[in-house]
Amino acid sequence: MRTVIYPGSFDPLTNGHLDVVQRAAKLFDCVIVAIAQNESKNPLFTLLERRELVAKSVEHLANVETDTFTGLLVDYVDQRSGHAIIRGLRAVSDFEFEFQLALMNRKLNERVETIFMMPKDTYTFLSSRIVKEIARLGGDVSAFVPPHVQSALKAKLAKRKG
C-alpha cells in the first residue's frame, strides 16, 4: 500500500489544500493529512480544532485520514510507514522554501521522497494567512474554504472580539 503524507498547519484548511488532498487521493492508496503542532506560527485554531475541521472536510474520501504530529516530519513519515511527502506549490516563491525543506528532509532520511503538486489555477493565490485576514476584516471567504470552516472562522473571530 502506497501512503503519502500531506503535512501542514492547516490554520485553517482552504479549498486549495482540499484540492491537493483530493488529487493525491487519486494517486495513492492512503493519504494522511498530518496537522503539525507549530506554536511558533501562533495558530488561530487549536490543534484539535484544526484536526476536526480537516477531518470533516475529507470525510467523503475513503482513503484519506487525518492525524497530528510533533517533531521531525521525516520521523513521522517513518512512524506511519509513508512512502512520500506531498507539498502544494502555489508560486515560484513557494518553490525555493519547499525545495530547501525537501533537500533537508532527504538529507535526514534519504528514503523519503517529496512530491510537489500545484493546486488548480483558481487557488494559486490562496493561503490560510490571507483567508484569516479577509475573515478578520469581515470579508466573505465562502469561495476559499469549505462551509463548516467558514462558520468556524466566524465563531472563533467573534469570540476573540468579545
Image (tube, grey):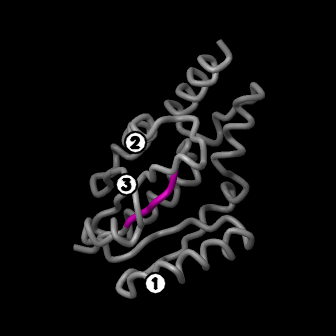
Mark 3 is surrounded, within 10 Å at the Cα level, by few (under 14), some (14 to 19) or many (20 or more) other residues, namely some
Identify the residue at horizontal 52%, vertical 80% (top origin).
Answer: 104
Identify the residue at horizontal 52%, vertical 35% (top origin).
Answer: 45
> Tag 3, which secondary structure?
strand
Residue 27's image quarter? bottom left
Residue 34's image quarter? bottom left
Q: Compared with residue 89, is residue 105 higher up or lower down, i.e. above or below?
A: below
Which amino acid, mark 1? Arg
Q: CA distance from mark 2 to mark 3?
A: 11 Å
Which of 148/44 is in front?
Answer: 44
- Tag 2 residue: 51
Which amino acid, mark 2? Arg
Side of 116 where 124 appears, left or right:
right
Residue 61 is situated, as x and y percent measured from the top left of the image, at 34, 51
Residue 20 is a magenta residue:
no
| Magenta part of the chain | 5-9
The image's mark for residue 106 is: 1
- Tag 3 residue: 69
Q: CA distance from mark 3 to mark 1?
A: 19 Å
> Tag 2, which secondary structure?
helix
